[in-house]
Amino acid sequence: RESTLPPGPPTIPLLGNAHIFPTKFAFFKFTEWSREYGDIYSLKVGTDTIVVVTSTKAVKELIDQQSGLTCDRPKSYMAETMYGDVHMTLIKYNDDWRLLRKNMHPILTPAGAAQHQPIQNAGATQLMYELLHSPERFFTHIQRYSTSVITSIVFGKHYPHYECPEIDAAFKSIHAAERVFGIGAHPPIDQLPFLNYIPDRWARWKRMAKWGNRLSTRIYFHLLKVCEQRIEQGEENGCYLENVIKHQEEYGLTRKMIGYLGGVFLDGGSHTTSAFLQTMILCLIAFPDSQRKAQEEIDSVTGHNRAPRLEDFTQLPYCQAIINETHRFRAVAPLGIPHAMRADGQYRNYILPKGTVIFVNTWGIYHDPDVYDNPEVFNPDRYLKNPFGTKTAVDLREFRNINIAFGGGRRICPGMHLANASLALNVMNLLWAFDFSPATDPGTGKAIPTDVFNYDKGAFYAPVPFQCSIKSRSAETASIIDEELRSAQTIFEKFAGTDTIEVESVDETF
Ligand code: HEM
């Protein structure tokens, strides 16, 4: 390790720290190292450098304030093979990235996101209806909800059911990305490029990246074609992508870029929101006091005679605290998405060379016992004491208002306004309408213990499907849900005639 780098675990010749690099749930090990080496430390993988940042102060100073330097993405064989060079989330910071990000604005600015509230509302009502009538399938209902909101806005396609070829293809693509980008899914090919000469039949990771490419391009270009055909047939329904297609030349986009633009929304918006809501339900079961407090709060504002509305959210500090605490307790992206240095730069007394990969260790920050009382306990009350939920002695000037769960700097999640509205609506709705409790084991008649660590080991942190009991809180709320779904049909009518269609079959093995 160069003496100008932040400290870190001892290295060995040639490999650096490659031999001790965690291959799953890397944030646990990264957090352990942060307690030993500090809020900024480095790892060497061959000659490459990785820096791990584990404090809000360092995120603010390095990722936000030096964003011009730290907004690149690392070079990645897997990303290039799976997505080529126009997937906005993973490409380098360049003119294509600027163009693509600019083209997202109409949907994702606060004002743009607000225009889509009717669709989000209708979708959230449908989710309540599904939980009311088939609660045992809550896991996939939530996935349908989060996917359908994005596809309605972006592709003008609403999905009334999870079981359909297009949602299936979308989730196959998302799960492929989870596997391809899971830390440890492949050897350090970017650091040891000679590995690229290994033929496919012996290089599992190469086959995996190509498999991911087949699955992702299949659904991206299927949905693009659906929009193109609607325009050709004069059956437009005013979705985002139709507008982009019609202004393709003016916006300076190629067809490939438009296909990937749609795909980025699908990848970025669907699994993140569903993982969050699934985690929230897990926490409500495991920590029933929080559930009870939130329900009391909602009842005092809305009663049982009407469903919550987004405007109610400002009057519900405990529900807001539940969202903050869910982000803190089980961040969907515990290591964010890695950034990289665009040029050599200095931070504190260290020199970070061009190309250095930077991980924001959101997990480590949010589970720091010096900052949070009992960080391993889900306790929304901490956010009622101060806006950042910290211990009293912590200097709040080191925090920023936007939750670090959304990353930072120029790469900060552009979907956060859309996501925040979705989370707010669903937290209110679900707690207003239902009681969540552990499922009962039919054999023993006892409650099945809730495991708050049973999570997927992919790139995102999503709970492994679990069982739970979901019961309507009252006959009044149940009938309001049925009625509201009938009213929501006027919103869904816009998508009439966009029923699910078969997607091209591709080789789904690798
Ligand atoms: C709970 C919900 C969500 C969470 C926790 C989340 C989190 C994140 C994080 C941590 C990043 C990386 C930021 C960085 O590099 O510093 C990111 C990037 C991104 N997110 Fe989200 N996200 C969510 C919802 C959404 C939604 C709804 C959309 C779109 C509709 C979206 C689209 C994107 C895109 C396109 C990027 C890449 C930005 C870039 O590289 O310039 N996300 N998100």
Image (cartoon, grey):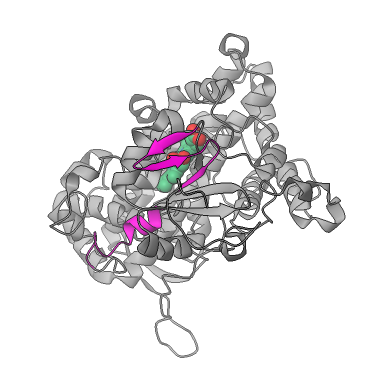
**Looking at the image, is 330 positioned above or below residue 89?**
below
Q: Which one is in front, 113 or 204? A: 204
Q: Position of residue 165 (x, y in %)?
A: 68, 47
x, y (%) of residue 23?
A: 59, 63
In this orientation, does residue 337 appear? no
Q: Classify residue 296 by image quadrant.
A: bottom left
Answer whether residue 76 is magenta in the image: no
Q: Residue furthest front?
A: 3
- Rendered residue at 54%/20% (across/down): 99
Q: Which residue occupies 51% across, 52% down?
A: 143
Q: Is residue 97 left or right of residue 285?
A: right
The residue drawn where x is 50% and y is 55% is 141
The answer to whether one can see residue 196 in this image is yes
Q: Residue at x 35, y 65 (%)?
A: 283
Q: Is residue 323 left or right of residue 296?
A: right
Instruction: Please state the extent of the stretch shown in magenta in the rendering.
Output: 344-373
